[in-house]
Image: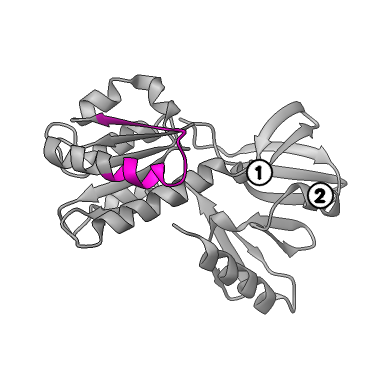
Amino acid sequence: MFQIAICDDNRVFLEYERKIVIICLSAITDKFVCDTFDSGEALLSLDRDIDKYDMIILDCKMDIIGGVETAELIRKNNDRVKILFATDYYEFSQSACNYEPIGYLIKNAPDFESNLCCKLKLAYRKASEKQRYLTDFAEGTIKVNIKEIIYINSYDHYLYFYLRPEIGSKQLRKLKKRAKMDDIKDALDDSFVRINISNMVNMSYITSIVSGEVCFGYGNFNSKITIKRGEVELIEEKFNKYIGAIEW
């Protein structure tokens, strides 16, 4: 079941958005729920029940608690839900980018409906994708979504997996597994790229490739790894192909 929430203090526009959502999603599935909220406070009052939503559309400017502030509070406990901002203004708050929105929609733009429908379809497809997991580690049987893996390092017969921090923490999680890189390549997907003999990086976290080094990070964590000699162009090609396929 695909679940979406719309939050806007303009009740006329809120109903307009709801109708677009229903028309758009009805064309691809009958298994969805669309809930509406006329304030950030109303949405936040759900507390951890917000976690049930796959996507939340937030009006940037609302009384008392605006959309950006609402997104900030949601992200303290939930880094999975797709957040889409809707605004009357072309100038966006730079801080909004900190909460990893999938985009911004201009309310009075002529292509508002088509853009919203496009984002809905993409979010639905992402939510429907089969997730891949790794489970067996030296620390025990732990279920890890491969999307949470930032990079993998090979050292002394072990693979060390560095994962996104737990919610509320700034420290990367670290797990290890007695294996070689070739042992796990089939368990990963094409978002991972081998940088050199000892390191593999999830391209979702790459920020740039500069002077023969891959720069990547998440939150307060930033690092760089030198690309294997002679493979800079290959890595750049893979990365450019990857980001060209990302829908948001």
Residue nearest the viewer, comparing 8 with 80? 8
- Is residue 124 toward the left or the right of residue 198 in the image? left
Q: Is residue 161 above or below residue 204?
A: above
List the residue tagged with mark 1: 146
Q: Residue 9 placed where, x, y %?
A: 15, 35
**Residue located at (19% from left, 61% from top):** 109
Number of the label disc, if any, that sits on residue 155: 2
**Residue located at (74% from left, 79% from top):** 230
- Is residue 198 toward the left or the right of residue 102 in the image? right
**Residue located at (11% from left, 34% from top):** 63
Q: Residue 112 placed where, x, y %?
A: 25, 56
> Quadrant location of residue 240?
bottom right
**Which one is earlier in the sequence, the residue at label 1 or at label 2?**
1
Q: Residues within 10 Å of mark 2 (few under 14, many from 20)?
A: few
Q: What's the amino acid at mark 1? A: Ile
Mark 1 residue element: helix
Of circles 1 and 2, the one toward us is: 1
Q: Residue 171 placed where, x, y %?
A: 55, 37
Mark 2 residue element: strand
Number of the label disc, if any, that sits on residue 184: none
Report whether residue 190 is seen.
yes
**Residue located at (71% from left, 56% from top):** 200
Q: Would residue 21 be counted in the magenta stretch?
A: yes
- Is residue 230 toward the left or the right of residue 172 in the image? right
Q: Which residues are magenta?
A: 20-36
Report whether residue 68 is seen.
no
Residue nearest the viewer, comparing 135 with 219? 135
The answer to whether the residue labelled 1 contacts the one labelled 2, judged by CB atoms less than 8 Å apart, is no
Q: Would residue 27 be counted in the magenta stretch?
A: yes
Q: Is residue 65 above or below residue 90?
A: above
Q: What's the amino acid at mark 2? A: Tyr
How far apart are the alpha carbons under marks 1 and 2? 20 Å
